[in-house]
Image (cartoon, helix red, strand yellow):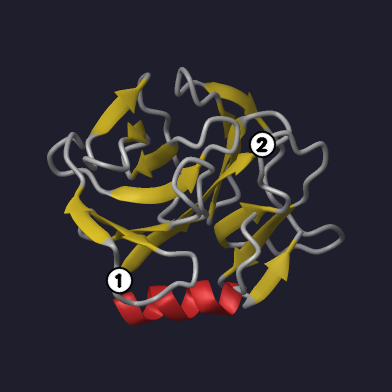
Amino acid sequence: MYRSPILGVSVLATMLGGTAAVASPAKHSGGDVFVLSQSGVLSRHDATLRLIPKSSKRITGVTKGDQLIGLDTRPATGGLYALSRSGQLYRTDVKTAAATAVGTPIAPQGSAVGFDFNPTVDRIRVVTDTGQNLRLHPDTGAVADTDTPLSYPATSRSPKVTASGYTNSVAGATSTALYGLDSAQDTLVK
């Protein structure tokens, strides 16, 4: 995970308005941060999170009528990946903003997702506000594993995780921890 204050990312996302996702810097991006708007515009910002982007381009190649809802950089390669509302995984060219479908769509449940690479096993974690908990293979787009649905131990409440991120999200990481934001409880969960 890029060591930038989460508040800075949150403030940037809020000020940009309608932001769908923010991706940490990729090793091949010079430390830049990528921001995806709800309207499908990919903007590139320097690591200081200045409001004025270095570049902005509408992402092309996404199926008509679909919307990108998750974005992250792959620590192992520096590639930029996105997930659409229909469950299609895309690899996205950071220079041209062209998205290329990877595999066939999965079936995400719910209206909000957390989408982040686990740097230790090179898999994409997808969690939803309904408790869905999947791992995707970034080369095939296939579900590599379905994990136990998200839940709070010893309570009847189910978390409504709408964002997630791994610590130590760098190539070669040997340890990491997954955190999520429970929007119903306004809490950070591990």
The answer for how far apart the CA atoms under marks 1 and 2 are is 30 Å
Q: Position of residue 143 (x, y in %)?
A: 54, 24
The single residue placed furthest to the front in the displayed view is 30
Q: Position of residue 58 (x, y in %)?
A: 17, 51
- Is 51 in front, or is 150? 51
Q: Which residue is mark 2?
A: 171
What's the residue type where badge 2 is placed? Ala
Residue 103 occupies quadrant: top left
Q: Which residue is mark 1?
A: 18
Q: Secondary structure at mark 2?
A: loop
Residue at the image point whose x is 66% and y is 47% from the top: 169
Does 5 sit left or right of 44 as displayed? Answer: right
Residue 101 occupies quadrant: top left
Q: Are marks 1 and 2 in contact (CB under 8 Å)?
A: no
Residue at the image point whose x is 42% and y is 38% from the top: 81
Which quadrant is home to the C terminus? bottom right
Q: Secondary structure at mark 1?
A: loop
Position of residue 21 relative to residue 15, above or below, is: above
Q: Position of residue 171 (x, y in %)?
A: 66, 36
Residue 88 visible at all: no
What's the residue type where badge 1 is placed? Gly
Does 4 sit left or right of 30 as displayed? Answer: right
Q: Earlier in the sequence, mark 1 or mark 2?
A: 1
Residue at the image point whose x is 60% and y is 31% from the top: 76
Q: Nearer the viewer, mark 1 or mark 2?
A: 2
Does 54 sit left or right of 47 as displayed? Answer: left
- Is 104 in front, or is 98? 98
Does 8 sit left or right of 180 as displayed? Answer: left
